[in-house]
Image (spheres, grey):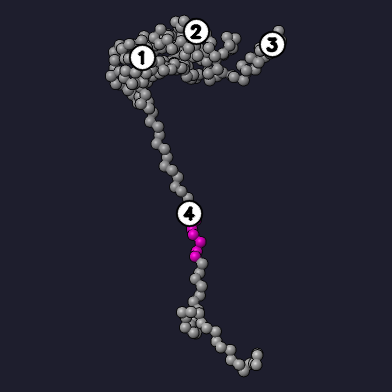
Amino acid sequence: MANDPSEKVPPSNPPEGKAEGAPVSPKPAAPAPAAPPKPAAPPPPKAATPGPVPLDNELVQRLKARFGEAIREATLDRKQAIVLIAADMLRDIARSCRDDEKFDMLVDLTAVDWPKREKRFDIILNLYSFVKNERLRLKAHAAENEPVPSVVEVWPAANWLERECYDMFGIVFEGHPDLKRILLPDEWEGHPLRKDYDILKQDTAWVRICTAASKK
């Protein structure tokens, strides 16, 4: 009879592989959470860029032998030979570098303004020798109103480069065949690459001048 308490219910079969009455193993504990990764170590500090070192190679010795005290200093900076010379000897030393040392190409001629220095301008010539595959930088210091010899007769490419320096810095190159502005109008006041140049003031003045001219 169904639901007769006198009937015995057969015992359920134990799990396969386990004997009847054997203790049930507890479930394995969940693994502990992984520790957070350690922060990466900071990168090692970059090595300081080496500064210029004195240079006294054969080229410098020959220049000193020819021009004496006009060769003020010679250094090597990032594998670039740099010779500081007297500004009034620029043309003569440039000609010697072309004819005697075979630096036949004027790559660039530019300037840097240091307004707090007595001789505020660095005049910089970057030269290249095709024969020797070498570069040389000539540098001269010049005061604000100190004329510098033109090197147009040595390297004709200096023509426009010197005009640009005159336009942007106000440096006068003595002996230049046509020294006048090349980027800015002739009426422009001041020289924009001087570090004490007030570009906002000049722009305002130039707009006023152009506006007045347009109304005439």
**Residue 50 magenta-drawn?**
no
Q: Is residue 93 visible?
A: no
Q: Which residue is mark 4?
A: 37
Q: Amino acid at mark 2?
A: Leu
38 above or below 139? below
Q: Eyeballing the image, is 193 above or below 91?
A: below
Q: Nearer the viewer, residue 191 or 86?
A: 191
Report the residue at 50% width, 79% height from top: 15
Task: Choose the circle earlier in sequence order: 3 or 1.
Answer: 1
Q: Nearer the viewer, mark 3 or mark 2?
A: 3
Q: Between marks 4 and 3, how big is the CA–CA gap?
A: 70 Å
* Mark 1 secondary-structure assignment: loop
Residue 205, how many percent across, how many down?
64, 15
Secondary structure that dominates the magenta span: loop
Residue 131 appears in the picture as rendered:
yes
Say which mark, if any, is on residue 104.
Answer: 1
Q: Which residue is mark 3?
A: 214
Q: Marks 3 and 2, how far apart in space? A: 29 Å
